[in-house]
Image (spheres, grey):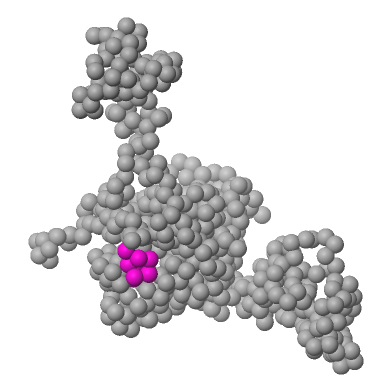
Amino acid sequence: MVNKLILGDNLEILKTLEAVSVDLIYLDPPFFSNRNYEVIWGDEGEVRSFKDRWAGGMEHYIAWLKERVEQMHRILKPTGSIFLHCDYHANAYIRCEILDRIFGDNNFRNEIIWQRTRNPKGSQFEKRNLGIATDTIFWYSKTENYYFNEEAAREQLQNGELAKKYPDFDESGRYYSGPVIRGASMGERPNLVYEYKGFTPEIYGWRMTREKLIKLDMAGDLGWSSNGKPFRKLRPENDKGNPIYNFWNDINRLYSGSPENIGYPTQKPEKLLKRIIIMASSEKDIILDPFMGGGTTVAVADKLNRQWIGVDQSVQAIKVTELRLDKQRDLFSAPFTVQLHKYDYDTLRYKNAFEFENWIVQQFGGTGNTKQRNDLGLDGRMSDNTPIQVKRSDNIGRNVIDNFKSALERYDEKLYAKNISEGKPAGYIIAFSFGRGAVEEVARLKLKSNIIINLVKVEDIVPIAKKPTLNIKITKSVRTEKGIWEIEFAATGTSEAGIEFYSWDFDHNSEKGFKASVMIDRDGRQIAKFRAGLHTVAAKVIDNDGLESVETVKLKVNGIVERAV
């Protein structure tokens, strides 16, 4: 399944992905800087990865990255491309020792130079060298038959630029004058010398045939100057934009005041990823980011109607990206899943039954049943076709065993008899817990009839933990100006795993879901402004396992601030 956020070591996760299944890979791995500022989130998974990466010098770093890129090459489709983002510390090694060796120098497409700032830190006066203003993005394809949208590889003109380029007006709108007669440098073309509306060009001729010229005139795009010479009216709606070359100096890095900024120090601008994605993929293609970080790649891919997979070893990276996706989602957004190390009992126990059945069957190693009717109550099967039944409940009783046994006999008589004769499981039942009657009946069937029914607890398939608890208090309220109240909130979360961070939604709508106003709050304290009226404030706490809880506060603001019922 695509549209998935996966927590874990990307090397191990890449090994589980199907070969030739991904259309485009963008990766922004940690740079070879050997500095602690690479540890951005500071959680256990990220720190462990940082230490492993720096167990040795450059050779160790290249080996660490190379084995991951080898897996990326394996899963990339023949028409796919990879864009690897790096800086001056290791770009030469990455190109020669990794990309050229794995993809082949014949599949090198471009070395893109991104000028991320016009005001780099440092100067020749401080360090006796020049400030660093650029990053490198290496573009390699898997084969020569790669997807490339040439029209997308253009910089679209903005309104101000369009007005400058198209200064003239007529009844059809903006235009600028372009040539319709060939120049001397283009050589003689006698076959294009003909008369039109009393005008005959010189021996170099028109730029088009008479038929095309008539169509141009009928469309209102042929003009005549005061001296009687024709010209072509070029329209902004037909302008494909300026060609983009490998030096990208039109996309600035994000600053603290940027609306996109989520507080992730190395966050890349959405415009940068948008250009790469539309240039090297089409709608419904699968985009992979194995070093997801702040989630820009998957957020942009989701907006552009691509499918995506995002991987990171940091709980915070996964949960912040989830918040980011939730914030931009609407009724037409495709669903996505989050794969963590541990799962909350309440979330699993009470989620949509059909979704849970398919998900847990896949986690168990089986294939879910796409039918929801006439399936004999069976929810999936193993690779050898042995049936699986899922019960999204606790304390399963004997009656479930009786019904399941009957379903097994009817489902596939030959397979049922074969499994019994070979002492293999005739079927599997997955549930949260099993009652004494179910356990005793399974034991009796095995002893008396050699019928083996395996009872599997959900917690034996995926680790389950308790989600954190959360409490919200109003600690202060001050009227700052006419009709405006400034209210201070304090959120306190508790979890056996420890608290990672809080998020806030100051205009919460239960139907639309949690839309973060403040995405990352380490301390659980926020101040927000409110006008008179009723308001709903929601806070979310995320613990070190990635589990979460949400609490809401309803406020009545009118002369005083009080919690509404």
Residue 298 horizontal/vertical position (percent): 48, 57
Residue at 87%, 87% (x, y): give it. 445
Residue at 23%, 26% (x, y): give it. 187
Q: How many marks?
A: 0
Apparent side of residue 207 relative to residue 121 in the rendered image (left or right)? right
Find the residue positioned furthest to the top.
Answer: 198
Find the residue positioned furthest to the front.
Answer: 190
- The majority secondary structure of the magenta stretch comes to helix
Q: Is residue 243 visible?
A: yes
Viewer-proximal residue among 300 and 548: 300
Find the residue positioned furthest to the bottom.
Answer: 447
Residue 357 horizontal/vertical position (percent): 72, 68
Residue at 36%, 16% (x, y): give it. 222
Residue 268 horizontal/vertical position (percent): 37, 57
In the image, residue 380 above or below residue 476: below
Residue 392 sits in quarter: bottom right
Q: Is residue 103 one of those drawn in magenta?
A: yes
In the image, residue 486 above or below residue 320: above
Residue 360 horizontal/vertical position (percent): 68, 71
Residue at 33%, 61% (x, y): give it. 106
Viewer-proximal residue among 453 and 397: 453
Residue 210 sits in quarter: top left
In the image, residue 329 above or below residue 211: below
Apparent side of residue 68 relative to residue 368 in the rendered image (left or right)? left
Give, as a single range, the part of the protein colored magenta. 98-105
Q: Is residue 274 visible?
A: no
Viewer-proximal residue among 514 and 200: 200
Apparent side of residue 388 relative to residue 57 in the rendered image (left or right)? right
Quarter holding the N terminus? bottom right
Q: Is residue 31 one of those drawn in magenta?
A: no
Quarter holding the C terminus? bottom right
